[in-house]
Amino acid sequence: MLKTFSLLAGLGLSLMLVSCQPPALKADGAPKFTQEEKQIIYSLSGFPDLPANPSNRHADQAEIADFGKHLFFEPRLSQTGEISCATCHDPAKGWADGKTLSEGIQIGKRHSPSLWNTAYQRWYFWDGRADTLWSQALQPMEDPAEMGSHRYALYRLFQSQPDLKTSYQTVFGDLPEIKAQPQQSDPLQAWQALNDSDQEQVNRFFVALGKALEAYQRQIVSGQAPFDTFVSGLKEKDEVKQAALSLEAQQGLRLFIGRAQCVLCHNSPMFSDQEFHNIGLPAIGGAIDAGRSEGIQRVLDNPMNGIGRYSDLVDKDDPWTDKLNYLELQDSNQGEFKTPGLREIGSTAPYMHDGRFEDLDQVLGHYNTATQFTPATGRREDTLLDLKLQPEETAQLKAFLFSLTSGPPTLDLVLPLSNTGH
Amino acid sequence: MKKKALLLSALILLVSALQQPVLAQKAEQSAAPHQNYRIDKVQRQQRVQISEQKHFRISYQPNPDPIPLNQHFRMTFLVQDLSGKGLDGLKLKVDAGMPEHNHGMSVKPKLKALGKGRYEVRGLLFHMPGYWEVYLDTPYQDKLERTTFGMTLEMKPAAHQHNHH
């Protein structure tokens, strides 16, 4: 009888242990990742090949990328002659500017996003109002708050500046000829004086600049971060490589893919789903930013999008066009912003579309109590639940996020062409 | 007396152990309050389904296969009656969502008839890992009859990897 009791007690104890099993740990307290966890972790490392962009036939041409690099750092492309793309996307500042709101000719409405791994994005700008990197690159040049120029002013600039004209002609051939020579000094008035045919020539020239800028920016891909070394170590059962992540960061990784569920939106090696979400950020003054709901209309209306007449797309039935062809404004788009990639996040503060959070503590603080706020606009996604992280868990997640930083860009991406042997 | 105490302890342990999974399940449900699965776990594995009112037999073939996470994909449905005859000229409606997260897709896919009971849907996108349901509504008399397909999207390493600088 006693044996029966012992057996019963033993069975009960075993069942309880199985059902209450805590997450497996190694002797040193580091997580012993399960096969399921490993599968997710492996999916976060190792960039896929650069995605094709059939709308830009120059996207992967080295000489066009060199010209794009020249353009990227060229302040003469701005109305004041003082602002270049690199002003807001400084390679020394994580290809961003470290400021709350971007500062071009004027203070902008949003925070400058980092350009790290930009080629992997499906949409551009925080609201996705561009569907290609070349289409994106054109807009700041004409935005009064950013570079404040105009496509016709740029055309005149390239006509008048021998170095710019030569560098353009070396890769794209002669500058397009336009018949009219409007006398208006204001480029917008001069542009309006051009006939359709001449405007089309200027548009073609302008689009070429964007396509060259894309070819350059496609090269901005993160290097190997400590997290990637850890993943290699996990695959190879190499403890030395696994030590690239501190114990605290490994615990943070388990939280990231587990209880905190960050990985639902921050997935793939870019740590982004490339889509848009309303995470319930409250209003902090100023105008309400509708985000994606305005971006959708703008990208569909833009004649310089990936399916418009300036696209190099050969096959109009290419599945690449599905993202634009089947895009539709939904009520849920109100107040949505693009999921930023988390690679290099340690060097790209501040955070969020409006740069409201100075550091990762503030970001994680929001997710700790996300449902306590009334969203500035729209409806917060139901996916978000209050994380209620303990202080040590916040520290663990931060340690993991900092392990996604690979370091500064390679010199060939940032040095002038004459110094890089081209 | 000792034996009785031991028996009582054993029973308490057993009952608590058996309760644990139930409690865990309850906690899971409270964390995801919007779960509303339309098909059971076995059906979720199947690419062929019978519609809810049992008037149609519908199967699907994704392209690419398996369905990639967070990439646009297309899907071809074969709509048949229960005798296996392909049905053309139907005004179908398609949608998809994640019952665990109470959200749908961020896109509006469209259907195109291919003939012989086949219909292609373009513009699908599953942007989040986890369990998705695709809903195909087929007209029968003056009502729409729903067929639900389940599919689980997992996070997997990229097949081809870019060289880090």
Image (spheres, coloured by chain):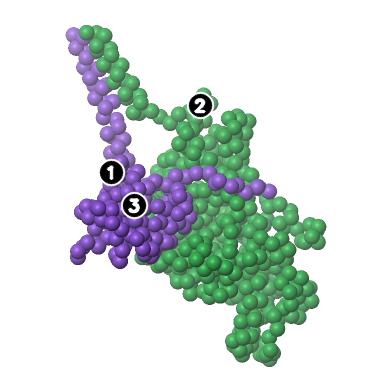
Chain colours: A green, B purple
Q: Which mark is residue A278?
A: none
Residue that appears at 60% across and 41% down: A228
Q: Does dot 3 land on a helix, a strand or a loop?
A: strand
Q: Residues within 10 Å of mark 3 (few under 14, many from 20)?
A: some
Mark 2 lies on residue: A26
Residue B87 at x, y = what percent?
29, 61
Is A120 positioned to the left or the right of B151 in the image?
right
Inter-mark Cα distance, 3 to 2: 46 Å
Q: Is residue B96 left or right of residue A298?
A: left
Disc with the residue nearer the chain's start (1 vs 3): 1
Q: Amino acid at mark 2?
A: Lys
* Observer-nearest of B130 and A285: B130
Q: Residue at x 48, y 59 (%)?
A: A338
Task: Give whichever of A408, B125 is nearer the camera.
Answer: B125
Is residue A407 placed above or below A108 in the rendered structure?
above
**Can residue A301 be seen at all in this image of the molecule?**
yes
Residue type, numbered disc 3: Ser
Residue drawn at x 61%, y 38% as measured from the top left: A229
Residue A317, image x, y percentages: 50, 66
Q: Chain of mark 2?
A: A
Say which element carries label 2: loop
Residue B131 rendering spot, x and y as whole percentages = 37, 47
Amino acid type indicated by mark 1: Asp
Q: Are marks 1 and 3 in contact (CB under 8 Å)?
A: no
Tag 1's secondary structure?
Answer: loop
Residue count near mark 2 (Cα–Cα under 10 Å), binned few <14, some 14–19, many ≥20: few
Q: Quadrant of the C terminus of chain A?
A: bottom right
Nearer to us of marks 2 and 1 is: 1
